[in-house]
Amino acid sequence: MDNAEEDAVQLHGDEEIIEVIDLNDTEQTPDDLADEFEDVDFSDAGNQDLDDEGWETEDEMGAEQDDSELTFSKHTGSVFCISLDPVMNNLAITGGEDDKAYVWSVANGEVLFECTGHKDSVTCAGFSHDSKLVSSGDMSGLIKVWKIETKEEIWSFEVGDLEWLQWHPGALVLLAGTADGNVWMWKIPSGECKTFQGPNCQATSGKILPDGKRMMVGYEDGTLRLWDLKQGNAIHVIKGHDGHQGPLTSIECNKDGTLVLTGSVDGQAKLVNTSTGKVLGSFSVGNSEVKSAVEEQDSNSVESVGFCNVLPLIAVAYLDGTLAIYDLSTQNLRHRCKHEVGIVNLQWEDESAFVATCNLGGAVTLWDARSGNMVSEYRGHSAEILDFTLNREGSIAVTAGGDHKAKVFCLQRPDR
């Protein structure tokens, strides 16, 4: 286990303070992280063409409210996923029900190229850490990687039914979780491969930690495994009473990777110390209406979780429309922010205490976590928003909708 980062939990009176101690006195560069994979014992593993064009700047929703700056209308089915390139934040990739993915400009909606050749809905898409490569993955398990500069496919591979796809934060390494419980790791473009075998159930969520050496994976049976990416072994396994009682839906970590926050359909969010594997706390909000246990669990599924970078706060989003803001030090509920419909996703702004959500009503909402007040709301989709992300400054949100559209919204705050 890596001793570079450790957690200490100290008790002061009746109050539990979670103190994060960083013992790593040298910060790793992306080159350092890439070097970590030079001597990984990979086993083994396998290209195509492209197309172009297509966008609109205004949505055709008649008198419907549309607060968006730009509408991307190339898809002919629901848009399931959206990502921004991490270097310049000026390119987006969307994947949809039409078995297609597009790389396009968020400034004018112009298509850079189409990721062709998929045979099922594209549900996963994202950029490498250096924004030079982009990946697209469909439900059947066909994964493709494209070089943005040349617009060419440089690698492809087929796994079982795909659950998630994620780039390493500092190396050209791609990881995927599948329905058979396996997690795959490839060097790109060589295709050298390594697998991490989980239980015989879906690997529903995954998160590579910032050190680039470990990965937390959540499974359909509620268990969590913290994997050592280099050695290929599970450092910690969290299950039973400590684990979740239903499939994992969301995993996020704090800035230095010492803490992980997980969410599940069981209505619980759990805080885990990545050094010890200990569960430091569980978070849930009850529903005011009287419901059966099954209805309660279904309605209160945790859909998304996240850490604030500037204050000791966490956010948990529920399918019943509750956005809960908790104090990380005391683990007390600080604010309960209600939406009229279920929340799909949340994201904290990088350098503020503002948190944005997207929901099944087709709106993006910005909240001030210090006060619990809504700052602004943005509409324009005629169906649910299925995915969204913010740019680095938190000044724009790009969304993917069930109305076959992706949109760009400019977010306004009191301090702007």
Image: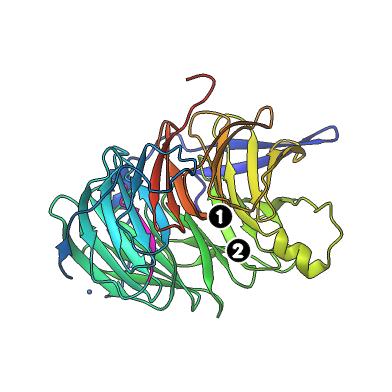
**Real-space CA distance between mark 1 and mark 2, rounded to the nearest whole angstrom:** 8 Å
Question: Residue 141, image x and y in percent?
Answer: 37, 74
| Outermost residue toward the top in this view | 415
- Judge whether residue 190 can be spotted in this image: no
| Residue toward you, 110 or 211 | 110
Circle 2 is placed at which residue position?
A: 248
**Residue 206 in view:** yes
Residue under pointer 1 = 251
> Where does the magenta region start and end?
121-129
Q: Give the residue displayed 65% in from the left and 61% down from the top.
A: 264
As for residue 254 lying within the magenta part, the answer is no
Element at label 1: strand
Q: Where is residue 402? Give x, y as percent.
A: 46, 59
Q: Quadrant of residue 71?
A: top left
Query: Going by the image, does 396 lie left or right of 337?
Result: left
* Residue placed most toward the observer, 44 or 276: 44
Contact (CB < 8 A) between labels 1 and 2? yes
Colouring chosen for the image of the structure:
rainbow
**Mark carried by residue 353:** none
